[in-house]
Amino acid sequence: MRQEQIIMGTPVIIEINDKEARQEFFDEVFDYFKYVDEKFSTYKDTSEITAINKKEIAKDTMSDDMKKVFELSEQTKKLTGGYFDIVTPDGSYDPSGLVKGWSIFNASEILKNHGVKNFTVEAGGDIQTSGKNENGNVWCIGIQNPFSQKKEIIKKIYVSDEGIATSGNYVRGNHIYNPKDKNDIIEDISSLTVIGPNIFEADRFATSAYAMGKEGIYFIEKLDGFEAYMIDKNGIATMTTNFNNYTKQ
């Protein structure tokens, strides 16, 4: 069973291949993403993050989920040497660089808690995989050509129980910046795809590594349990040492 809804301004796609799949499982996951959108969207006047930015809510009175995201964001900032920061150039908070992967991971845990073993949860191209696909094989995920408007796939990877996240400015424009120089527009790379032990880890490090520009691939290379595939502005690909392990079925 495969279902899709537009939430958080992006397609959210859930595919479950277990015989025990129920509509209630899909509904619960979609409802969770709607909750996340209502709480963390910087585009919604009614969201908690908007209220925080308007100073209508003090940081010490934030909800537990908001406190957790701020805590994880600070942790990620330290782990990346400052290349991840939810403080935007105008001084407001925007945790979206962490929230998407975090929410996909949490949504996957909802399915696992229901005993679901074979599924994918995707939001905006970032994916958590689990188990096998409908043919009993590991999941095949495509990496998109950042220069093509037709969603051309230039590389296929085969994964099971991993998270895959891609960062780039080719879809939404220059929305990722270098926190160490907020006037620096990242132009030397077009996309960076990271495979990690789960989508939360893959997503937060993909965002951080992209902000590093061409040096980001070397940052991922040093992380245990992670692989990456980078495409620069000239269309030249660079991959980490063991990335090719994921290109074989």
Image (cartoon, grey):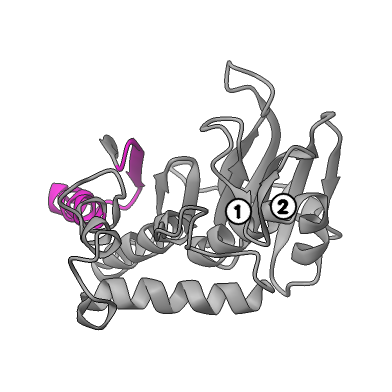
Q: Position of residue 71 (x, y in %)?
A: 42, 79
Residue 7 percent location from the top left of the image: 27, 40
Residue 170 visible from this viewpoint: yes
**Distance of mark 2 from mark 1, alpha carbons?**
7 Å
Decide if residue 2 is on the left or right side of residue 99: left
- Label 1 crowding class (10 Å Cα cut-off): few <14, some 14-19, many 20+? many
In this picture, which residue range is highlighted in magenta?
A: 8-36
Please tell me whether mark 2 sits on a helix, a strand or a loop. Answer: helix
The amino acid type found where label 2 is placed reads Tyr
User: Which residue carries the number 1 mark?
Assistant: 159
Q: Indicate yes or no whether the magenta region holds residue 129.
A: no
Residue 132 shows up from this direction: no
Was residue 28 drawn as part of the magenta stretch in this picture? yes
* Residue placed furthest toward the top: 150
Which of the pair 5/41 is nearer the observer? 41
Mark 2 burial class by Cα count in 10 Å: few <14, some 14-19, many 20+: some
Looking at numbered disc 1 in the image, what kind of residue is underneath it? Val
Image quadrant where residue 54 sits: bottom left
For residue 246, the mark is: 2
Q: Residue 88: give its label.
A: none
Circle 2/circle 1 CB separation < 8 Å: yes
